[in-house]
Image (cartoon, rainbow, N blue to C red):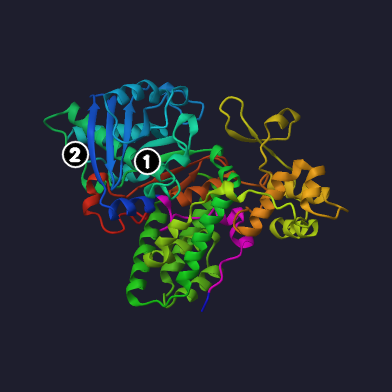
């Protein structure tokens, strides 16, 4: 039996993409599997944290060929200066991932620049730049409890899930950091976003060490360390806004590689029999997911309604007998909501590492080599491709415009205004396709001749030709429609990172948890072959 991949017109709709969940192919899990398989070691050569939490620290990760170091700076931030917005100029902590192990001269340079973030100057020895703010009430509660010799309240921990949340993790050349090309040929960096995920994982270690150090300084004779099981219940939070959404549009080939890997993994699993040991592994993952869904909280009305449906889905899934993967999947396609269906995709992959994990190597792309336009293509063929990809039958009602903000050069979404035209971004892909189709009305010939007369349509022609070769490259919705929810784009990308417990604060920004339940660097030597399933109870 050969199972066909789900068609892009089904998968690449935002209502479904906004229901994706982390899986074995998420980048956080790829990172921890590699660190474990290659026996990476970790140390903390610098840890200078004062009683008030200020200071600096260095966490180094040593692999087979090279080392990387998180350099952390913790600050005394007045409450009125604390903000998760991109326009903030001060943070509770700032970080960079250094290529190698920094010496005293490096630390002095970084100490003068990293706390300033984009206002500072970093070099190509730095791979990422990041900052984070405390979840103040939980942070203070944990320090206070440990200093009194007791463990913090698990209910309060689970209600928040993290002591700090990052508000940005910049890489790939931004603000002077190393370009992606500088590290792309390193095996440990080949998969997408590996240095960013390593940064966040090491930040988590720093934050938990920081609260323990603060408690110890406050009460040296009485303070205790966090219980290891309780410690692992802390993740790292993240606040992510509209600036992340255009990534999926700007990187169509990469998006195709991610979705293709996920759909291929699903198809491979559906071809398999269901022996008892694999069913047991599925049930364990399913039950952990059910506990996680039960603990997931949000106040956003759209996500709250989806969560209610997902909880009902999990009750149905737990009650459903597991006799075969294909039968379970066919049942789920009609019995479950989109949230439930996409969680079922992730759960079906869990028992099959030998079928799934290797696909991680296919999830990168050298996109520049695939962006050349084929000028020989007949316009009739281009028309057919446009209609196949976008189903041009008019667009979804009134339009908004994507533009770049003047202050931070960040993507924004607003109402049409001639003043925004110089700052507009080419993200209204379906409307651009409709405009191209209209411009071709009555014309014959080839693409090259058409673009000589209409060069303004080059980017749309390129996208359509890419989608012919890479079927999951294009989101099949109107990205400028007033009905479009940017949070769905954020959810899709963050699921591939490995994020969980999505909590939209509006339709344009979301809070998430990362690495909740994962081992810490000092625990990796004793971790299992799959160090973290990403589905903490």
Residue that carries the numbered disc 1 in the rendered image = 200
The residue that appears at 42% across and 27% down in the rendered structure is 122
Q: Is residue 24 a member of the stretch shown in magenta?
A: yes
Q: Residue furthest right?
A: 442
Crowding around mark 1 (Cα neighbors within 10 Å: few <14, some 14 to 19, many 20+) is many
The residue that appears at 42% across and 71% down in the rendered structure is 319
- The local secondary structure at tag 1 comes to helix
- The local secondary structure at tag 2 comes to loop
Foreground pick, 376 / 269: 376
Residue 72 numbered tag: none
Q: As displayed, is residue 12 above or below residue 86?
A: below
Q: Position of residue 97 (x, y in %)?
A: 36, 35
Q: As displayed, is residue 303 above or below residue 131?
A: below
Crowding around mark 2 (Cα neighbors within 10 Å: few <14, some 14 to 19, many 20+) is some
Q: Position of residue 515 (x, y in %)?
A: 36, 47
Foreground pick, 481 / 449: 449
Q: Earlier in the sequence, mark 2 or mark 1?
A: 1
Foreground pick, 395 / 334: 395
Q: Residue furthest left?
A: 221
Query: Residue 301: in sight, yes or no?
Result: yes
Residue that carries the numbered disc 2 in the rendered image = 225
Q: Is residue 387 a member of the stretch shown in magenta?
A: no
Magenta-colored span: 3-27
In the rendered picture of this protein, how many numbered marks are placed on residues?
2
Tell me the CA gap for discs 2 and 1.
22 Å
Q: Position of residue 322 (x, y in %)?
A: 41, 75
Depth-wise, is mark 2 or mark 1 nearer the camera?
1
Asked whether, in this view, residue 59 is left or right of residue 12, the answer is left
């Amino acid at each position: 039996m050969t199972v066909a991949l789900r068609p892009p017109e089904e998968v690449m709709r935002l209502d479904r993409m906004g229901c994706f969940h982390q899986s074995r192919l998420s980048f956080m899990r790829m990172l921890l599997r590699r660190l474990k398989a290659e026996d990476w070691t970790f140390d903390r050569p610098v840890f200078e944290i004062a009683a008030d939490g200020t200071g600096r620290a260095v966490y180094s990760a040593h692999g087979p060929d090279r080392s990387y170091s998180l350099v952390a700076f913790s600050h005394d931030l007045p409450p009125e200066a604390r903000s998760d917005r991109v326009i903030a100029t001060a943070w509770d902590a700032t970080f960079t991932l250094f290529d190698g192990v920094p010496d005293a001269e490096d630390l002095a340079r970084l100490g003068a620049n990293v706390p300033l973030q984009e206002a500072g100057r970093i070099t190509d020895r730095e791979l990422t730049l990041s900052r984070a703010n405390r979840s103040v009430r939980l942070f203070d509660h944990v320090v206070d409890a440990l200093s009194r010799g007791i463990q913090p309240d698990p209910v309060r921990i689970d209600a928040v899930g993290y002591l700090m949340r990052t508000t940005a993790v910049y890489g790939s050349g931004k603000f002077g950091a190393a370009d992606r090309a500088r590290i792309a040929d390193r095996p440990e960096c080949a998969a997408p976003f590996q240095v960013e995920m390593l940064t966040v994982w090491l930040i988590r270690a720093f934050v938990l060490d920081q609260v323990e150090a603060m408690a110890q300084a406050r009460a040296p004779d009485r303070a205790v360390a966090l219980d290891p099981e309780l410690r692992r219940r802390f993740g790292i939070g993240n606040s992510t806004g509209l600036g992340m959404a255009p990534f999926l549009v700007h990187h169509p080939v990469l998006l195709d590689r991610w979705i293709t890997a996920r759909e291929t993994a699903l198809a491979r699993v559906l071809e398999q029999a269901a022996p008892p040991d694999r069913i047991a592994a599925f049930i364990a993952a399913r039950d952990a997911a059910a506990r996680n869904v039960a603990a997931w909280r949000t106040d956003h009305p759209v996500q709250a309604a989806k969560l209610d449906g997902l909880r009902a889905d999990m009750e149905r899934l737990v009650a459903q007998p597991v006799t075969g993967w294909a039968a379970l999947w066919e049942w789920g396609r009609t019995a479950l909501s989109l949230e439930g269906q996409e969680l079922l995709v992730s759960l079906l992959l869990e028992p099959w590492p030998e079928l799934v994990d290797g696909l991680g190597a296919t999830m990168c792309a050298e996109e520049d080599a695939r962006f050349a336009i084929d000028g020989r293509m007949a316009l009739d063929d281009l028309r057919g491709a446009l209609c196949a990809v976008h189903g041009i039958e008019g667009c979804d009602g009134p339009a908004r415009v994507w533009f770049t903000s003047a202050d931070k050069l960040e993507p924004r979404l607003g109402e049409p205004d001639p003043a925004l035209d110089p700052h507009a971004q080419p993200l209204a892909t379906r409307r651009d396709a409709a405009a191209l189709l209209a411009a071709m009305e009555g014309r014959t010939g080839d693409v090259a001749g058409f673009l000589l007369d209409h060069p303004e349509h080059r980017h749309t022609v390129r996208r359509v030709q890419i989608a012919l070769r890479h079927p999951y490259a294009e989101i099949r919705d109107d990205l400028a429609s007033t009905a479009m929810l940017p949070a769905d784009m954020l959810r899709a990308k963050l699921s591939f990172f490995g994020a969980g417990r999505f909590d939209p604060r509006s339709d344009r920004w979301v809070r998430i948890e990362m690495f909740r339940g994962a081992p810490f660097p000092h625990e990796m030597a004793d971790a299992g072959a799959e160090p973290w399933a990403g589905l903490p109870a």
